[in-house]
Image (cartoon, grey):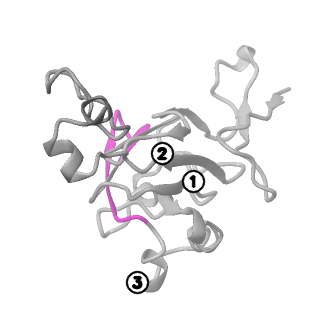
Amino acid sequence: MRTVCRVVAGCALAAGCARVEMPDAADGGAAGPPRIADLQPPPGAVEPEAQFHVVFSKAMDEGVLLASTGRSETVVLAPDELVERAAAAIEHSRLSAEERSLLVAAGASISAGAAELDLAPEKPLSPGGYWLLASTRLKDAAGHHLQAAARFHYSVSVARRPHPDRAAAGLDGRGETSPGCGSRSRRAAAR
């Protein structure tokens, strides 16, 4: 008998949340479908240069994990505005060029006997929301598929930078003196 746990990862969508199957300790994790066992960074705010590391509970079928393009078409990143189309696209075999354009271009590499996948976006992520999606087409070496598609939400904030004139004057974005750039702010000097 297995215990089913629902884990909410990131923000909940009306369409559903990430669902993870957890086998009872008695079977040592060997029975049941494969699942995402760990994800780094965890869902939430990330830097524009973020790279993603997905750990599966079992060794996965490399042929499904990586496409002939050297990218993954089953574990992908998609921007908020295209997530529904991207999620639908990765649920069928081989993506078309148009469907690949829905995804964030990212190199993929397999490690640890096909139980881990690294996704590295080719360019820094622009400010906004992104979803890491995992397809039910993923399967382990024995042919067992992920039981449910998974979604994990990430966000990239706009970097707050001071105006170039303020930076040259030694002021940060709030009009205060930056450390080491003088002892008074422009406001204090104007008095």
Say which residue appears at 14% left-offset and 21% top-offset: 180
Which element is circle 1 on?
strand
Type of secondary structure dominating the magenta stretch: strand
Say which residue appears at 46% left-offset and 47% top-offset: 157
Which element is circle 3 on?
helix
Q: Give the extent of the magenta segment.
A: 104-119
Q: Which residue is mark 2?
A: 60
- Sequence-first tag of 2 and 3: 2
Disc 2 to disc 1, C-alpha distance: 13 Å
Q: Is residue 30 left or right of residue 7?
A: left
Cβ atoms under marks 3 and 1 closer than 8 Å: no
Q: Which residue is mark 3?
A: 97
Disc 3 to disc 1, C-alpha distance: 19 Å
Q: Is residue 15 above or below residue 26?
A: below
Disc 2 to disc 3, C-alpha distance: 25 Å
Q: Is 27 inside the magenta-drawn segment?
A: no
Q: Is residue 118 above or below residue 69?
A: above
Q: Which residue is mark 1?
A: 134
**Label 3 crowd (10 A; few <14 / some 14-19 / many >=20):** few
Q: Is 112 inside the magenta-drawn segment?
A: yes
The percent coordinates of residue 140 (x first, y second) are: 54, 46
- Sequence-first tag of 3 and 1: 3
On the rendered image, what quadrant is the N terminus found in?
top right
Q: Nearer the viewer, mark 2 or mark 3?
A: 3
